[in-house]
């Protein structure tokens, strides 16, 4: 038998409004800590290399997801990346019209993974698959080791 | 027809208030150690079951999807099981379904918890498990529910706070010998009694700490287990039940949901007299009185009789029924799901005689692990044998 | 294998490390807002609280009078049958003196908390609430208590329309 008594007047249905406010202080992790320090101190992306399958990963990781062993070898990328894919966003997170931003997934030759970031205004018009790009960095004194240390990527 | 399931390897990380490792990295370390112990590589693993408590601790939504590469679960059948604090013992139960059903011959079971991201204190996330309309506006904390239950338990059976404190003394003492322990210490009943009252009758030293950590076991079917090891530990009984979230309508002096889960597991394992047939127990002890409460639910002590058993030394490592020889959550730490899995690891090592300084005196052949959680409502139980 | 392993993995970050900001932590605040539907039973319950009354539901099969009220009986697994006004008096089932707030910060004035079994509902049907007008050391399990209501104009249809429960006999 179903519940027969219902609320037929919508005004009789009550709601309770509240929030569950949460604040997080995340650790970057063993590999993440090294990645962030390299970005902050030298403005470069740190890559991990698996001694077994020889695959490299960016951002640096602690373990190889396919061989499931620790990756101890790291190196910083000096060469430019390339635009793997890109999209232009016209709305903000609430879905309202906002600032127009072009975002790209930047990959690096011979490296798994990549970095998601903005393309700079001058590069947007030239955005195309495969164009070579390099990061525009904030000044060393302003960098914290977050991806926001990078202002955007520009054509190399 | 269900198949017999064995545990063939176990792994664990340090338990600490805050660890540098990300949830993926913690999971990797524990999984890697369990695989090494079993003599397997990831390629040998057919399915993965993971366990972790509320996403609000790690601060990652879809935590099960996020951490799975640390559990070696990419491209494999993976499921996350969840019953709050009961999750740690529920995780190998989930693995048991995978193997006992005949679906898979090997299953990696991993429990991870990183509570430290939540600021200023992980306690805060527990606020959101209470009823949002009828309870949260009163300013609830999880401690309320424990202190209300502890008081009712003491009232019903005439138990003293000093008797309950014996559990904290024993477990923190046992944890001194656990290499991963966060709070191993030699303390006295007076230390517990004189510690800060935080939510009376609960005092500072009655409570386990929040922690980061991970633990894992490898399960195998009988056929595979016998090929890989001469010392399998059999997962011979599993049980789990939940009660309603209307916790204020319940008898707070006795965990009936634990009794039901225990009876389910005992029946499966063919145990008729638990107190005689079980040699060693790892009940869930986030608070000291909880160990006592759970011993009674597990039918290892009569109602209201677990405190006396503790005071008499029966539950010490050299006693007739060693309880929490690991050091429990009170001593080793309480990264929620990983803490329950730590108990599974402990029984695995104890039953194989590999627990070193923690090894119990008696020749333990059968053990029971149990976890508890959600809104005072879940019991998860496993019976393990060598 | 426990005794065969000498080195357990993991890097601890100590309290001092955090204070000195030795690691590159990432901080983030998350404030989602929700509007939870109270449903049939609790909408009525809240309306009654606003009127200074407590209402329960009765299941005619097990004859239990349930509070908080629900439209189904979770034991008989059938719809409950009728609304029943119950009293705003009850008995302390268990209590606690809380020195911590929701975020585990220490409170200057402790909160007195109790499960109160309400008169007129089935035995053991308690609700969570606060106690007031009582010295913490005088609270006892089994003590009779009565709701202290907010002024009608201050009530908003919330559990906090009851300010707290106070001892029935001085």
Image (tube, helix red, strand yellow):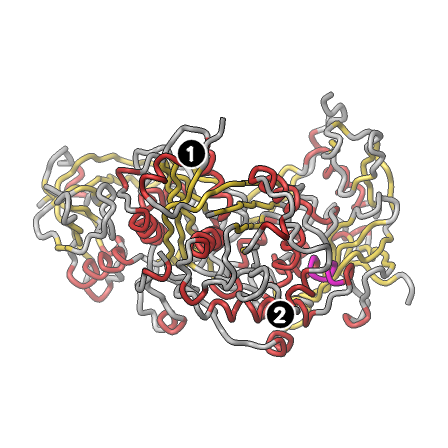
| Image: magenta residue range | B149-154
Crowdedness near tag 1: few (<14), some (14–19) or many (≥20) residues, C-alpha within 10 Å: many
Q: Which mark is residue B99?
A: 1
Q: How many marks?
A: 2
Residue named by callout 2: B166
Q: Is residue B150 magenta?
A: yes
Observer-nearest of A148 and C99: C99
x 62%, y 58%: residue: B290
* Secondary structure under the numbered disc 1 in the rendered image: helix
In the picture shown, does residue A28 fall above or below A93? below
Which residue ends up furthest to the top in the rendered image?
A: A1
Observer-nearest of C82 and B202: B202
Say which chain tag 1 marks. Answer: B
Q: Quadrant of residue B224?
A: top left
Taken as a whole, is the magenta stretch helix, strand or loop?
Answer: helix
Q: Is residue A3 visible?
A: yes
């Amino acid at each position: 038998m179903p519940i027969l008594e219902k609320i037929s007047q919508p005004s009789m249905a009550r709601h309770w409004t509240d929030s569950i406010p949460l604040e997080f202080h995340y650790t970057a992790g063993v590999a993440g800590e090294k990645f962030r320090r390299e970005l902050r101190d030298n403005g470069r992306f740190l890559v991990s290399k698996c001694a077994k399958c020889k695959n490299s990963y960016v951002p640096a990781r602690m373990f190889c997801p396919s061989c499931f062993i620790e990756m101890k070898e790291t190196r910083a990328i000096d060469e430019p990346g390339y635009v793997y894919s890109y999209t232009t966003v016209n709305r903000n997170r609430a879905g309202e019209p906002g600032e127009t931003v072009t975002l790209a997934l930047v990959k690096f030759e011979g490296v798994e993974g990549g970095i998601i970031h903005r393309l700079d205004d001058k590069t947007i018009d030239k955005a195309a698959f495969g164009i070579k790009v390099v990061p525009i960095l904030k000044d060393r004194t302003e960098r914290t080791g977050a991806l926001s240390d990078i202002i955007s990527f520009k054509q190399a | 027809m269900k198949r017999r399931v064995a545990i063939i390897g176990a792994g664990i990380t340090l338990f600490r208030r805050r660890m540098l490792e990300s949830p993926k990295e913690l999971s990797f370390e524990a999984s890697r150690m369990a695989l090494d112990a079993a003599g397997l590589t990831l390629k040998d693993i057919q399915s993965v079951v993971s366990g972790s408590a509320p996403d609000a601790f790690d601060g990652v939504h879809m935590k099960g999807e996020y951490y799975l590469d640390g559990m070696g679960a990419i491209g494999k059948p993976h499921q996350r099981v969840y019953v709050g604090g009961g999750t740690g013992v529920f995780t190998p139960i989930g693995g048991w379904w995978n193997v006992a059903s005949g679906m898979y011959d090997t299953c990696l079971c991993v429990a991870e918890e990183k509570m430290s991201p939540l600021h200023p204190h992980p306690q805060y996330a527990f606020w959101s498990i209470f009823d949002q309309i009828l309870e949260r506006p009163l300013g609830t904390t999880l401690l309320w529910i424990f202190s209300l239950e502890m008081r009712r338990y003491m009232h019903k059976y005439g138990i003293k706070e000093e008797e309950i404190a014996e559990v904290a003394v024993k477990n923190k003492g046992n944890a001194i010998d656990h290499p991963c322990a966060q709070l191993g210490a030699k303390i006295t009943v007076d230390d517990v009694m004189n510690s800060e009252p935080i939510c009376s009758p609960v005092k500072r030293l009655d409570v386990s700490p929040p922690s980061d950590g991970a633990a894992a076991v490898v399960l195998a079917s009988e056929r595979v287990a016998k090929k890989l090891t001469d010392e399998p530990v059999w997962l011979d009984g599993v049980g789990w039940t939940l009660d309603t979230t209307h916790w204020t309508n319940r008898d707070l002096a006795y965990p009936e949901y634990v009794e039901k889960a225990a009876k389910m597991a005992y029946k499966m394992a063919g145990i008729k007299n638990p107190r005689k047939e079980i040699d060693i127990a790892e009940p869930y002890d986030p608070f000291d009185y909880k160990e006592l409460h759970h011993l009674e639910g597990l039918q290892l002590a009569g109602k209201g009789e677990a405190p006396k058993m503790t005071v008499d030394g029966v539950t010490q490592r050299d006693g007739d029924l060693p309880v929490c020889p690991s050091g429990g959550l009170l001593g080793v730490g309480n990264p929620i799901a990983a803490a329950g899995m730590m108990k599974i690891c402990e029984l695995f090592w104890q039953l194989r005689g590999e627990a070193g300084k923690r090894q119990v005196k008696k020749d333990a052949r059968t053990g029971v692990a149990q976890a508890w959680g959600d809104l005072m409502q879940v019991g998860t139980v496993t019976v393990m044998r060598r | 294998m426990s005794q065969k392993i000498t080195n357990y993995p993991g890097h601890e970050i100590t309290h001092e490390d955090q204070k000195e900001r030795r690691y590159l932590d990432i901080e983030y605040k998350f404030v989602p807002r929700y509007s939870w539907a109270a449903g049939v039973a609790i909408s009525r319950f809240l309306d009654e609280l606003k009127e200074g009354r407590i209402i329960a539901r009765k299941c005619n099969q097990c004859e239990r009078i349930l509070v908080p009220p629900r439209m189904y009986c979770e034991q008989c697994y059938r719809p409950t049958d009728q609304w029943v006004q119950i009293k705003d008096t009850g008995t302390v089932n268990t209590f606690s003196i809380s020195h911590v707030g929701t975020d585990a910060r220490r409170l200057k004035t402790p909160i007195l908390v109790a499960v109160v079994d309400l008169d007129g509902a089935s035995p053991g049907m308690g609700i969570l609430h606060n106690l007031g007008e009582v010295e913490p050391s005088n609270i006892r399990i089994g003590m009779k208590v009565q709701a202290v209501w907010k002024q009608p104009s201050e009530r908003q249809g919330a559990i906090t329309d009851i300010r707290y429960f106070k001892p029935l006999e001085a």
